[in-house]
Amino acid sequence: MKEAIHRASNVINVLLDYSRPRPLQRTNEDIHSVIENSLTLVRHQLNKELVTVVREFDTTLPSLLLDRARIEHVFVTFF
């Protein structure tokens, strides 16, 4: 139960962050981490729809200069 509450709280906080207008905040980020976090946000829906996600990451990719919150929003929308 505590884990479900924690997960719901994280989702709500991320959604609130997406809704706030703010300037572009670019930092060097590991795209794999961004994708994993985005998948975490939609995991419940994926499980509910019986979707299996297969990850095949290229470990040689360099960090990317991006706005993490905005790119996560793009991935969540995509997923």
Image (tube, rainbow, N blue to C red):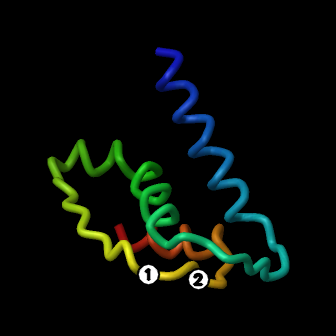
Q: Where residue 47 sits in the image (x, y, percent)?
A: 24, 44
Q: Name above or below for residue 48 compared with residue 34.
A: above
Amino acid at the residue labelled 2: Leu
User: In front here: 77 or 24?
Assistant: 24
Q: Quadrant of residue 23?
A: bottom right
Q: Name above or below for residue 52 compared with residue 21.
A: above
Q: Where residue 66 sits in the image (x, y, percent)?
A: 65, 81
Q: Is residue 49 left or right of residue 74?
A: left
Disc 1 or disc 2, which is closer to the eye?
1
What residue appears at the point 74 percent right and 80 percent down from the top-left corner? 26
Looking at the image, which residue sits at the far top? Answer: 1
Q: Name above or below for residue 26 compared with residue 77.
A: below
Do residues under tags 1 and 2 come within 8 Å of each other at their CB atoms?
A: yes
Q: Where residue 79 sits in the image (x, y, percent)?
A: 35, 67
Label 1 crowd (10 A; few <14 / some 14-19 / many >=20): few
Q: Where residue 64 sits in the image (x, y, percent)?
A: 59, 83
The residue labelled by disc 1 is 61
Q: Quadrant of residue 17?
A: bottom right
Secondary structure of residue under mark 2: strand
Q: Name above or below for residue 38 compared with residue 62.
A: above
Report how far apart the C-alphas of labels 1 and 2 lie in the structure.
Answer: 9 Å
Q: Is residue 43 left or right of residue 41?
A: left
Label 2 crowd (10 A; few <14 / some 14-19 / many >=20): few
Looking at the image, which residue sits at the far front? Answer: 60
User: In front here: 59 or 16?
Assistant: 59
Looking at the image, which residue sits at the far right? Answer: 23
What residue appears at the point 67 percent right and 64 percent down from the top-left corner? 18
* Residue 3, label in figure: none
The residue labelled by disc 2 is 64
Amino acid at the residue labelled 1: Leu
What residue appears at the point 83 percent right and 74 percent down from the top-left corner? 22
